[in-house]
Amino acid sequence: MDEGVCAVRSGVDVNRYARLLARVHDALLSGDRPPADPRVLVARSWQRARAQGVNPDLDDPPGPVGADEVEHRRSVSPLQRVLPELRAALTSVAEDARHIMVITDADGVLLWREGSTAVRRGADRLGFTEGANWSEGVVGTNAIGTALAEAAPVQMFGAEHFVRSHHVWTCTACPVHDPRTGELLGVVDVSGPAETIHPTTVALVGTAVKLAEASLWRSHETRLETLRNVGAPLLARHGPGLVADEHGWVAAVAGMPNLERVAVPRAGHPVAVHGVGVCMPEPVPGGWLLRAGPAERIRLTIDLAGRPPRAVVDSSTRWVHPLSTRHLEVLVLLARAGAVGMDAGALSVALYGDREHLVTVRAEMSRLRRTLGGLLQARPYRIAPDVDVEVAGPVSALAGSTAPGVRRLLDV
């Protein structure tokens, strides 16, 4: 069977192909030789589902989260801002084609579901409802969960689904990423009866997601422009400083180096800004004002001996940030790279052994920059040149790392 996003090529006898997939599914799960190999994407997903203990004869998936939790997740999801674009692109088409449009968050929890009434009733019987978790670890191979796991568009047909009760469905899903950072925000999916599958659905969903991501970018630029109009007069009156939004994106700068992003400002928590020193955030409409104090040299210590490992930032004051294993690996690699830094491809090779994890790398760097902000620079990724860096503790503390780049450091 061919590898690719589309599950069925044009001209294929859908009914005959569905029967073949059913035989493949039964053979692989019973340990027999299948009449054909599943797509590589599907085989990987089935392996993950089996490793996570998913039951292929699952009748009733775990119950959905409560209505209050669904509303909370909707309220904090950036995808609520692009619902009009997604509805305009997909809902009417879904209704005409006997499909439903589904939008999930990054955990795979269904937040919105619209489209054909008859198909929604069928989905209800599978527990495919608002609040349900459709990740691979819960319901096995499916377009939503596999798109989350692969960080790529996915179309699933019939018995490519791991759970047998899902074999009467086809679904096409595409992840949505934050256009600023590459962070995964959720998934857009179009699902319906298996016989309604069509290769063009892949392009339809992909185009809708591209439009949504473009809208998110325009919204970001609009919010920064609004904040810039607020911040410019403040900076003119209060001297050197910057104005940033609630996520640390810089809207305006005066009397200090230009920056793209700082650590996420919080009331009462100082923010270290490279080239400036420590700033105390002050709330302004739509964001934060960070005024420069006396210039302070900043030291970043990557403490390998800490439990857990941590990043320690020293300037006029000291604060400590616990580090996940992945973020510790990233900082050690960047410290060793020095001023040259590493682009997303180089980090992907160093962390995963290939260049296929660019989206994951960018998302991890975005999360790390929320904490360390301007101490980390992009294009390429590197520690800011005026930050003193020290890796403290034995490198053997990273002995459990599977990252190829870290393994090479251990072998030196």
Image (spheres, grey):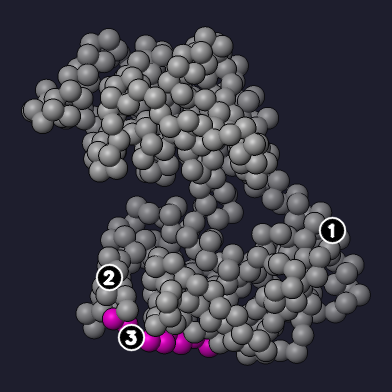
Sequence-first disc among 2 and 3: 3
Quadrant housing residue 370: bottom right
Q: Quadrant of the N terminus?
A: top left
Residue at 60% from the left image edge and 25% from the top image edge: 89
Residue that carries the numbered disc 2 in the rendered image: 400
Residue that carries the numbered disc 3 in the rendered image: 394
Does residue 97 appear left or right of residue 112 in this picture? left
* Placement of 295 over or under 112, stated as above or below: below
Q: Is disc 2 surrounded by few (<14), some (14 to 19) or many (20+) residues within 10 Å?
A: few
69 or 151: nearer the viewer: 69
Quadrant housing residue 215: top right
* Placement of 202 over or under 232, stated as above or below: above
Residue that carries the numbered disc 1 in the rendered image: 285
Does residue 351 appear left or right of residue 186 in this picture? left
Q: Is disc 3 surrounded by few (<14), some (14 to 19) or many (20+) residues within 10 Å?
A: few
Q: What residue type is labelled 1?
A: Pro
105 or 171: nearer the viewer: 105
Helix, strand or loop at label 1? It is loop
Helix, strand or loop at label 3? It is loop
Start-end of magenta stretch: 386-396
* Placement of 39 over or under 246, stated as above or below: above
